[in-house]
Image (tube, rainbow, N blue to C red):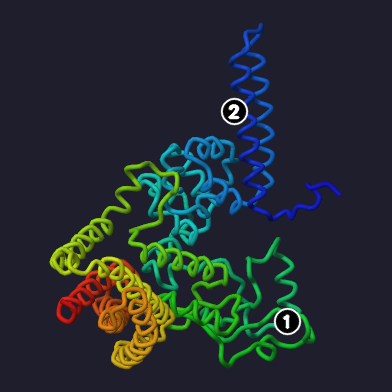
Amino acid sequence: MSEQDERHPDDVQQHLREVQELLGRHKVVEDLVHRQDMPRHELVEGLVHKQHLAELQNHLDRLHPADIAYILEALPLEDRLFVWDLVKAERDGDILLEVSDAVRESLIETMDPHELKAAAETLDADELADLAPDLPPEVMQDVFLSLDSEEREQLRAAMSFPEDSVGALMDFDMVTVREDVTLEVVLRYLRRFDELPDHTDKLFVIDREDHLKGILTLESLLINDPDMAVTAAMHKENVISFEPQDEADDAAQAFERYDLVSAPVIDADRRVIGRLTVADVVDYIREESEHEILSNAGLREEEDIFASVWDSVKNRWSWLAVNLVTAFIASRVIGAFEGSIEKLVALAALMPIVAGIGGNSGNQTSTMIVRAIAMGQVEQSAMQRLMKKEVGVALFNGLVWGGLLGVLAWWLYGSASLGLVMTAAMTLNLLLAASAGVGIPMLRMRLGADPAIGGSVMVTALTDSGGFFIFLGLATLFLL
């Protein structure tokens, strides 16, 4: 069996390698043709160019929009735009939805207004709402005017809700049935569809005014007698539904807790206005996870890895400036004890251990607290209890690991007093780290800020400066 036959069709890494290979072959052949001095040079070049373009385009046509988006994100800007030009126009909208915000911006900048309008018109209202913030206002105006009245209302509704709400995630493509018909009627109705909406595992049962009365699972539809009424086969109790103002985080937890595939979204009068699917929730969870990782590193937003130097600098400079200030403070703390370090050189070798262990411990605590906040497991009232628990953990670790380091310091430098100072400094810095790991994210939550943003930067700054001050201060008091 050939390697091509063995490869799984969804291996996106393999797709990326194949596209990169085709791009490389195209560049090599073009370069060779340019160097040759032969008759009909332009004809040969044109034939070779068209052959490679056709091969690359055929490969792209076979890929899922999500795979193409992945490939575009992994290519340098020049190659990315070259591949983007080969994508069929009718697929532009789906791919723009899949790529990251930073890469989407680079693609939109190269598109003419009529191309953007054509791409946007292929999308549903909920998808268009996701893309709308990145489109020029004049393009959105043209697209809005091209929609029918129902689609306009849906687009207005989707764009009116905050980004982290259920309303911003819901879609309007769903199947509803009436409660006063039989299952046979429902089956005949479904056969009229060319295809059901993605992730349809249940039908929403409504009355004449679109009020939610229950849900009819596909399982109930298939296993019950076709003559049975929908009202007898549907589930009326414990129906999980959401309102558009609900927090997306809460909805994500409900999907995980109850293993949901889809759920209705209802308004204040219990009218069904949309649905939430597991695909929307998974996308939201992934985006939030990426945001948390970037925030912890002090990055303001997702960054195109092939962005220009200036774009990357703008994204990173703010927290680097904070780091610079905190590092300067730490250096001044060390500078204040220069005399002590000159008299006892061992301090210079040992103090990074105290600061490093404290920073690691503080970041562990901070990560646990931020995760608990994100999962909705922590309220402000729990701060005192959490602080007490983390201080207990820090005290235990400080005495055990600080004691071990104290023994090592005693053995290396022949000073029991230095070992005791090492143990005390380690314990006190771990207590500081625990307090910062709990206090910083909880305080940011109380102030309405994102608890994850810059947490590791601030914790590390405190444990570095605090660790140096505690260790060198104790050494100055008791050893010199």
Report the amino acid beneath label 1: Glu
The local secondary structure at tag 2 comes to helix
Q: CA distance from mark 2 to mark 1?
A: 55 Å
Q: Quadrant of residue 183?
A: bottom right
**In the foreground, 161 or 330:** 330
**In the foreground, 231 or 45:** 45
Residue 71 against residue 447 in the figure, above or below: above
- Residue at the spot 34% in from the left edge and 85% down from the top edge: 398
| Of labels 2 and 1, the one closer to you | 2
Residue 295 against residue 471 in the figure, above or below: above
In the rendered image, the residue lying farthest to the front is 414
Report the amino acid beneath label 2: Lys
Label 1 crowd bin: few (<14), some (14–19), many (20+), radius 10 Å:
few
Q: Quadrant of residue 402?
A: bottom left
The residue that disc 1 covers is: 219
Q: Which mark is residue 27?
A: 2
